[in-house]
Image (tube, rainbow, N blue to C red):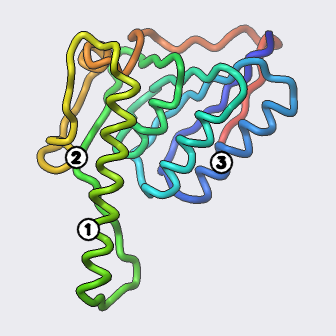
C-alpha cells in the first residue's frame, strides 16, 4: 500500500482547485493506492469548489479527508468527498449562506440578477444534497438549508462527529519518513 498525502491550506479558487487536482493526479501516476487530503480552507469560489468535489469523488482509490485547521463554506463540500473523514480536536467547520463576488462588474440587468439568484439557489440545493448524502448515517439529521439561507453555523469536532461530517475526531499523524509521499500546494 502506498499512501500519498496532499496538503492544502488556502482559499478555494480556480488555481488552487487545479493545483489539488494536479497533485492528486501526480500521486496516482506515482503509484498511490490511497490518498489523504489534509486541508484547511476559508472556502471561496463555488464553481471551483464543486468541480474539485466531483473530481475527488471520481478518484479510483480511497480518499480520506482531514480537517487540520478550519474548513469553511464550499470547503465543507470538498471535505465531504472523502470516504473516510477526520478532524483534529479543536478544529471547526463553517456552513453559511452562499454568496458571489461580482469583481469589476458595475451594472447588471434584471435578467442577469435573476440568473445569479437562480444559480445561488441551485448551488445551495446541491450543497445541501451533498451534505445530506455524506451524513446520512449520522444519528442526528441536520437540515443545513437554514444555514445556507439564513444564519451561519459552526460545528466543532464533537458536533461534526454527531452530525456525520466526520467519522472521528483525532489528531492527524504523519507516517515515518519513507513510508509515504507528500504533496503540497504553494
**Spatial separation of the CA atoms under disc 2 and disc 1:** 13 Å
State which mark lies toward you, 3 or 2.
2
**Spatial separation of the CA atoms under disc 3 and disc 2:** 30 Å
Question: Residue drawn 43% across and 41% down?
Answer: 75
State which mark lies toward you, 2 or 1.
1
State which mark lies toward you, 1 or 3.
1
Q: Which mark is residue 148?
A: 2
* Residue that numbered label 3 is attached to: 186
- Residue 10 image point, x, y percent: 50, 46
Question: Residue drawn 52% across and 55% down?
Answer: 48
Position of 18 with respect to 28 (left or right) is left
Q: Are marks 1 and 3 in contact (CB under 8 Å)?
A: no
- Residue 88 image point, x, y percent: 42, 17
Query: Badge 1: few (under 14), some or many (20 or more) residues near its Cα, within 10 Å?
Result: some
Q: Nearer the viewer, residue 138 or 67?
A: 138
Position of 143 with respect to 48 (left or right) is left
Q: Are marks 3 and 2 in contact (CB under 8 Å)?
A: no
* Residue that numbered label 1 is attached to: 117
**Spatial separation of the CA atoms under disc 1 and disc 3:** 34 Å
In this rendering, the answer to whether 173 lies above or below 36 is: above
**Element under disc 3:** loop
Q: Which mark is residue 79?
A: none
Write down the quadrant of residue 71 in the picture: top left
- Residue 92 image point, x, y percent: 32, 28
Question: Residue drawn 59% across and 50% down?
Answer: 17
**Element under disc 1:** helix
Query: Badge 2: few (under 14), some or many (20 or more) residues near its Cα, within 10 Å?
Result: many
Q: Earlier in the sequence, mark 1 or mark 3?
A: 1
In this rendering, the answer to whether 88 lies above or below 124 is: above
- Residue 97 image point, x, y percent: 22, 51
Amino acid at each position: 500500500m502506498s499512501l500519498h498525502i496532499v496538503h492544502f491550506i488556502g482559499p478555494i479558487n480556480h488555481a488552487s482547485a487545479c493545483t489539488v487536482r494536479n497533485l492528486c493526479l501526480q500521486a496516482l501516476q506515482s503509484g498511490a493506492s490511497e490518498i489523504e487530503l489534509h486541508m484547511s480552507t476559508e472556502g471561496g469560489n463555488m464553481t471551483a469548489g464543486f468541480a474539485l468535489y466531483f473530481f475527488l469523488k471520481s478518484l479510483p482509490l480511497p480518499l480520506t479527508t482531514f480537517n487540520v485547521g478550519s474548513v469553511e463554506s464550499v470547503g465543507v463540500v470538498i471535505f465531504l468527498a472523502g470516504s473516510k473523514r477526520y478532524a483534529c480536536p479543536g478544529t471547526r467547520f463553517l456552513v453559511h449562506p452562499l454568496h458571489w463576488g461580482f469583481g469589476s462588474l458595475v451594472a447588471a440587468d434584471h435578467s442577469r440578477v435573476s440568473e445569479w439568484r437562480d444559480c445561488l439557489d441551485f448551488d445551495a440545493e446541491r450543497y445541501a444534497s451533498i451534505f445530506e448524502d455524506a451524513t446520512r448515517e449520522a444519528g442526528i439529521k441536520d437540515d443545513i438549508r437554514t444555514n445556507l439561507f439564513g444564519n451561519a453555523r459552526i460545528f466543532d469536532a464533537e458536533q461534526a462527529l454527531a452530525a456525520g461530517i466526520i467519522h472521528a475526531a483525532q489528531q492527524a499523524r504523519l507516517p515515518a519518513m519513507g513510508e509515504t509521499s507528500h504533496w503540497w500546494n504553494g
